[in-house]
Amino acid sequence: RAGADDGQRRVTTAMPKKDSAERIKMIDTSSPRGTRDFLPPDMRLRNWLFGHFRAVSESYGFEEIDAPVLESEELFVRKAGEEITQQLYNFEDKGGRKVALRPEITPSLARLVLQSGKALPLPAKWFAIGQCWRYERMTRGRRREHYQWNMDIIGCQGITAEVELLSAITTFFTNVGITSEDVGIKVNNRKVLQAVLEKYETPPEKFAPVCVVVDKLEKLPREKIVAELSDLGLAEETVEGLLNSLTLSTLEELADIVGEDNEAYMELQQLFALAEAYGFKDWLVFDASVVRGLAYYTGTVFEGFDRAGTLRAICGGGRYDALLAAFGGESKPMVGFGFGDAVIVELLKDKGLLPSPPHSVEDVVVVLGDDQQRLNASGLVTRLRQSGRKVDFILEDKKMKWVLKHSDRVSAERLIIVGDREWQEGNVRVKMLEAREEMDVPIAEIC
Ligand SMILES: CC(=O)Nc1cnc2ccccc2c1
């Protein structure tokens, strides 16, 4: 019963009273806090964006995967202090299982790799477009869900994998009209930070938590970062050496600090050389301060940014060779990126590149006659659709004025009128709406 007195809202299925004075109280029609609805215009834009994600993934020979939005919580429980794990949308289900809505896709992808075991031919090139969740205190009023495009290469330990992914990202940007003047991709390698920590004999388990803190450098004042690093047990000289290494601006300076035989230096050298050969080097910027905020990155890291500096990171990724071992599996080299559906839309708006894809059908079919003509029209519509036409069949008697306005609204090419007299003569009446021509067309020739 609606409005039951126990305060629990139940939807009644009883027929509403005919002329009831009191109507049933309207439900809240807005979507839950931090989430979005996609009405047709929004869905057309989303399909346009995801269509580009998919087209690039397929042009790079990647195969699509998906996994449940709901995962075991253990997939995401990490102790490195990441924001993403502190905002887990987790709960205990009716079976007492600790579950969570995925905040990212990479752990699910790793689970699928472990599940496939030795049967998985390597290298595997997988992509996914999936909804991800976080539970934010609404004080910040930020969204609690977004869709993320991921591309990952499993089983390739060389820098060639990173460069393939960076190429895919620049191809996506180019395909939607964004240039390397609008956007750059900062590239770094966490092995720099690792070398510095080792130089000061820092225990290896500090590596991931240090990266998580360093990633907040642009968001928090320096002294806060220094304090958090000291709280992790880093000596003062380690903190100084570490923060100093983030200010390097060229690979040559890096070589001076870590030596030309350092892995990070060699890998970055190779990355830039390969990028030049692909032709997208002018998108890349070496930036020693980029570490990304996810605990599991071990090598190359990168993030797309708008050169105007007004937006948050557009996308990000890196190499995470140790993730399978963290799940108790046999290690395999892995590298990938995540690309959210929020910042890119803001960027496209700023650049005047956001399309508004129209709802379009090809044929509108309307009946101007008796029941027999509706039967005739039904057969005609079926034949039109089987011949590949997109047909909006007017299902009720409508005035021609409404039909013409509707045909314009759905950007139809043709209005096909099934009428008694024409049908007797073996024809239908066709209005070519663009050319504003009207003619009788033999029924057999309409497809
Ligand atoms: C700009 C934006 O909406 N970001 C966003 C929104 N929802 C998320 C949900 C889970 C993880 C990260 C997320 C990030």
Image (tube, helix red, strand yellow):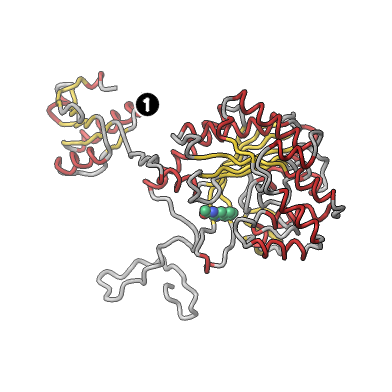
Is residue 349 visible in the rendered image? The answer is yes
Residue plotted at (25% across, 30% down)? 413
Task: Quarter of the image for the C terminus: give it.
Answer: top left
Q: Is residue 161 above or below residue 82?
A: above
Question: Quadrant of residue 219 in the image?
Answer: bottom right
Left or right: residue 128 versus residue 349 is: right
Residue 433 at x, y = what percent?
Answer: 20, 31
Total numbered labels placed on residues in the image: 1
Residue beneath label 1, please?
A: 388
Task: Quarter of the image for the N terminus: give it.
Answer: bottom left
In the structure shown, which secondary structural element does the residue marked by tag 1 occupy? loop
Residue 232 at x, y = what percent?
Answer: 78, 62
Residue plotted at (63% across, 53% down)? 102
Residue plotted at (48% across, 32% down)? 174
Residue 203 at x, y = what percent?
Answer: 86, 55
Q: Amino acid at mark 1?
A: Gly
Which is nearer the eye, 180 or 163? 180
Which is nearer the eye, 276 or 86? 276
